[in-house]
Image (cartoon, grey):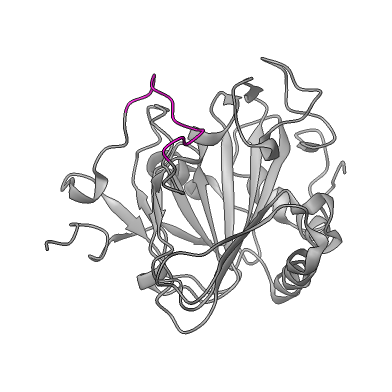
Amino acid sequence: MTEPIHQYSTPDPIREFNTEFALPDHDACQALREDGVVCLRKAHDPGWLSLVEEGIEQALSGGSEDVDIVEKAKDTGRFSYSSQAWQQVDAFRRAIFDSRSPDLAFALLDSDSMNLFYDFLLIKEAGTANATTPWHQDHAYYPLHGVGVVNCWTALDPIPMETALRFWAGSHREACLYQAANFAGDSDYRHVRSDRPIIPDIDSDASARILAAELEPGDMLAWDSYSFHSAPGNTLDRRRAAFSINWASDAIRFHDVPCLASYRAPELTEGSVMTCDKFPLVRTRAQAAGESSY
């Protein structure tokens, strides 16, 4: 059996920038605009990582109302994920609002204001080699109009190339939405939209430039919500975890279509701005650097 061209071959590197003592600069923003993804080295320090680990313990012990466990056939480990946990888990809330997280994201967005969209915890334990993440666009699942959502995904463990996220460089540029990938394999998958083109066979497309980066804890990938990306299962003998925060620019409007409850709020109607208790306004251009409106 012939393996896909790109999935296990050596990808091109994601452009990277050291943000330990500085926010993303013009070159980092340009990389995000051109490639659809950028790597920010040392985005978060050990104290922030410890706070997220505290949140993980709270979330997995019942603190989060939205924790799902995926168990794939032949896997001995668990693939756990949780969304919107910041509303119940204090450690996640502090990691999001009382840190440089909003400033890192706001520096990447060409926007006069920024809302928190949602947080997402992702843990692939050892023994989850079959828990692959198919090629998909995050925006395909969102009830949103517009361009200007960035996913800030921070590694909590060392992530070598064999378990690294893959990105199709430039796949965000036309802001074309494709079918939502069927993660569960259900025949009645709720996100299927017949009015959208099917996902291309990216692994077999020799012209598709694939990007990836090995990460250390605290390194962050930031990508456009229209960018195609995928990930292999965890073939390591240890956990592979990440905590992501999704932010929305002032260009984003609510689109009243069927979607997960995580992406909805009762006060939002078709075409409305995102600001509400569930999706709070966190930054504006008028604010002093480092301040939070939460």
In-image side of 142 versus 7 (left or right): right
191 vs 239, nearest the viewer: 191
Residue 285, picture quadrant: top right
Residue drawn 12% across and 63% down?
1
In-image side of 271 versus 231 (left or right): right
Spot occupied by residue 268 in the image (x, y as percentages of width and height): 76, 22
Q: Which residues are magenta?
A: 187-197
* 185 versus 115 height, above or below: below
Residue 275, picture quadrant: top right
Residue drawn 53% across and 74% down?
125
* 26 versus 175 height, above or below: below
Residue drawn 23% across and 51% down?
203
Spot occupied by residue 235 in the image (x, y as percentages of width and height): 39, 76
Spot occupied by residue 81 in the image (x, y as percentages of width and height): 61, 59
196 is within the stretch colored magenta: yes
**Residue located farthest toward the bottom when viewing the structure as drawn:** 237
